[in-house]
Image (cartoon, rainbow, N blue to C red):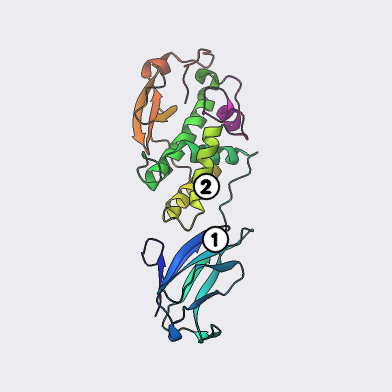
Amino acid sequence: MAKLLRSNGAPLGAQITLFPGNRLQFKVSGLGPHRKHLVLRSTDSVLSVVPLRVDDRRAEQVLRLEVQDHSIVSRRVVHLDAYVTDAQGRLQHKDSNTARLTVELEPRLKLPEADTEAGILARMLIVENAAPSHPKFVSLDESLESMQWMVHVLRNRLKLGPQHFSARGASTLTTLIKAQRQVEGFEQFPQLAPAQNVTLNAILNLAHDGADNRYRSHQIFVEHAIAVSKGTKAGADPCPKKLYAWKTEGSDSPGHNFVKFRAKGGQDFYTLTDAFLAQLTPNTSGALEARR
């Protein structure tokens, strides 16, 4: 009986998940009859097994799974079976002592189109929130709430009047996000600033790398951003006076007219002071001079 192991020696398990373009190196420990290595075959050509180091004088062989880098539009289940060979290396039959490996091939998550409100929101939420690989990450539940609160901040700014937040002329969430001094790196959207583009791609890559054991948490993180951007997980504004700003937890206040409400998911969220709200009128033109 042969054992399928990860590169670090941990068991590969009976089932794994991979995405288009993924490559997973693994080891097969143990020889078959005739002191020959078992041969692993995929039941679907979309998944191939590439031999990297196979030497019958050694009990361990190194292989790599490769998923074709083309569109997989729906979940597909592929199996990997081990075959016994004869003394000349010709396939004979399946090895009943080596468990079949099930490989779930998942399509990549699709962000809303960039030219839609949901599209800019989804990308902003992914970039602005602490992902599972970020030092300030707390939990997926907290990051979901943080995403929801951010959208409330933006909607509240539009309703109160974007001119109070140095965003005069903004009339939609898209124009508000792109306005100067609002969300860093999104001023020229759909082109992102370099730092924000790197962050977005790094998170999306992790969410679609089945060879990385962090993929599932990042996948859920991205799924949350998509759901919040589309309004299917809107959540409620938790602040009685409404939320009007956020900054990375521990950062300086966005301005003297803001008061911290609560920290959530690695972010500090703010409302407005009673004094400012009391003197505010629909025609007030002064800006709060705050970024987020």
Residue 72 is marked as none
Q: Are marks 2 and 1 in contact (CB under 8 Å)?
A: no
- Residue 242, percent across and down? 42, 29
Q: What residue sits 55% from the left and 63% below the top? A: 66
Which residue is labeled 2 in the image? Answer: 204
Packing grade of label 1 (10 A; few <14, some 14-19, many >=20) is: some
Which residue is labeled 1 in the image? Answer: 106
- Separation of disc 2 and disc 1 at Cα? 14 Å
**Stretch of the chain drawn in magenta:** 168-192
Q: Is residue 257 above or below residue 115?
A: above
Q: In this view, does 32 lie above or below 48?
A: below
Q: Nearer the viewer, residue 47 or 247?
A: 47
Q: Nearer the viewer, residue 88 or 139?
A: 88
- Residue 110, percent across and down? 59, 50
Amino acid type shown at disc 1 = Glu
Q: What residue sits 60% from the left and 26% below the top? A: 171
Q: Is residue 160 above or below residue 96?
A: above
Report helix, strand or loop for mark 2: helix
Q: In which quarter of the image is residue 170?
A: top right
- Residue 26, percent across and down? 45, 65
Q: Is the magenta stretch mostly helix, strand or loop?
A: loop
Residue 249 in view, yes or no: yes
Packing grade of label 2 (10 A; few <14, some 14-19, many >=20) is: some
The answer to if 212 sits in the magenta stretch is: no
Q: Is residue 255 above or below residue 97?
A: above
Amino acid type shown at disc 2 = Leu
- Residue 55, percent across and down? 47, 73
